[in-house]
Amino acid sequence: MRRRYLLLLVVPVAVLLALGALPSLIGGGDVYYVTATEIDLEDGEPAHENVTETIPADNLSTNRFPYTMSALEADDGVSDSYEEGRFGFKESFTHTPFDEFGELEIWESNAVDGDAVWVEQNGTFYRLEITQTPETDNGSADRSDRLGVARIAH
């Protein structure tokens, strides 16, 4: 009888783990955001020698790139938060912003420089980064205050 109750408890937990439902509820780790900073082109030259292209946001799916797209669509340029799980447990079962940036780098390595990705949406260019605070260096979370200058060949 005891074994049956134990199985009734263990089997649903194992199924939930396999589906990723339980790890998404486990938090306690660092919180990350994708931030989109609007940038201007200057002389059509790359901002960095490794950046010669941009990724068109029209080719990105909200289902496949939820953090990237929520940063681009947000008024303040900040995505929904992602909280790491303890001991790397959650990352094995859930989608992360790091997965998105890794996929974007594979897709177009010329649009990636270190931890930043350059994206174009409706003629506007953005520099995407994964940060632990939704604010920028100047302390503002408002996209209009974060207008920077970068040179990107398009």
Image (spheres, rainbow, N blue to C red):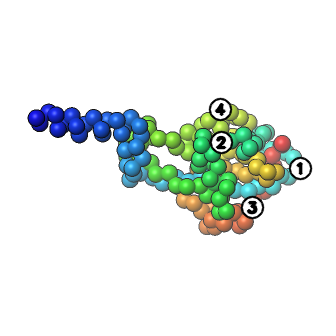
In the picture, which quadrant includes the C terminus? top right
The percent coordinates of residue 47 (x first, y second) are 78, 47
The residue lying toward the viewer, choosing from 107 and 22, is 22
Name the residue at the right extreme: 43
Residue 53 is at least partly visible in this image: yes
Considering only order in the chain, which callout, 4 or 2, is on the residue closer to the N terminus? 2
Residue type at mark 3?
Answer: Leu
Would you say the residues marked 2 and 1 are in contact, meaning their CB atoms lie under 8 Å apart? no
- 11 left or right of 126 in image: left
- 128 left or right of 22 in image: right
Considering only order in the chain, which callout, 1 or 2, is on the residue closer to the N terminus? 1
The residue that mark 2 highlights is 61
Residue 137 is at least partly visible in this image: no
The residue that mark 1 highlights is 43
Q: What's the residue at 17%, 38% (across, down)?
A: 5
Q: CA distance from mark 3 to mark 1?
A: 17 Å
Secondary structure of the residue carrying numbered label 1 = loop
Q: What's the residue at 71%, 67% (across, down)?
A: 145
Considering only order in the chain, which callout, 1 or 3, is on the residue closer to the N terminus? 1
Considering only order in the chain, which callout, 1 or 4, is on the residue closer to the N terminus? 1
Secondary structure of the residue carrying numbered label 4 = helix
Secondary structure of the residue carrying numbered label 2 = loop
The residue lying toward the viewer, choosing from 107 and 73, is 73
Considering only order in the chain, which callout, 3 or 4, is on the residue closer to the N terminus? 4
The residue that mark 4 highlights is 106
Residue type at mark 2?
Answer: Ser
Q: What's the residue at 30%, 38% (across, down)?
A: 12
Residue type at mark 1?
Answer: Asp
